[in-house]
Amino acid sequence: MQLKLHHVNLCTRDVPGLDAFYRDVLGLETEPTLGAARVTAQGYAGNVAFVTDGQTQFHIATRDLHVGFRTGQAVNPLDRGHIAFRTDDIEGFKKHLETKGIPYSDYGNWAMNGWYQIFFQDPEGTVIEVHQVQG
């Protein structure tokens, strides 16, 4: 089972402003491949901008305090944001968390077409996503 840092999700009330900041000040480029992959009918239809440094992506999303309530999940990845890792074995990673006694929210194929996502928290409450690209 491999893990690799994939993206950092930043939550804001001003997506265009934060998007402009990261592109203008840090020189990040718009990530063109993700906009069409978004799923907006499963509990989150907020505005999202995708930028990248060529390796790591930044997903700049509208803060939404009620995603957990609408999806029935304990962990809300769009309150304060999250860090995300990509794996090649989501089922193995879920078993790993269970062995460690770490609860997680299994969002499945929720926000991005072809991504199976789970979310959990570190001991300080930082939300962590692990996802696997599906077929």
Image (cartoon, helix red, strand yellow):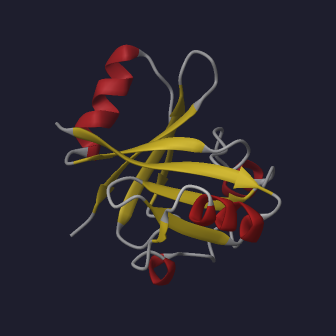
Q: Residue furthest bottom?
A: 36
Q: What residue appears at the point 50 percent right and 79 percent down from the top-left corner?
A: 35
Quadrant containing the C terminus in the rendered view: bottom left
Residue 105 is left or right of residue 92, and the answer is right
Question: 17 or 110, which lies in front?
Answer: 17
Locate residue 53, reporting x and y percent: 40, 58
Q: What residue appears at the point 53 percent right and 22 percent down from the top-left corner?
A: 122
Residue 20 is left or right of residue 89, and the answer is right
Note whether 34 is above or below 23 in the view shown. Answer: below
Q: Residue furthest left?
A: 1
Quadrant containing the N terminus in the rendered view: top left
Residue 20 is left or right of residue 14, and the answer is left
Note whether 47 is above or below 103 in the view shown. Answer: below
Question: 99 or 35, which lies in front?
Answer: 35
Locate residue 129, reporting x and y percent: 47, 43
Image mark count: 0
Note whether 45 is above or below 105 in the view shown. Answer: below
Question: 51 or 104, which lies in front?
Answer: 51
Residue 43 seen by the camera: no
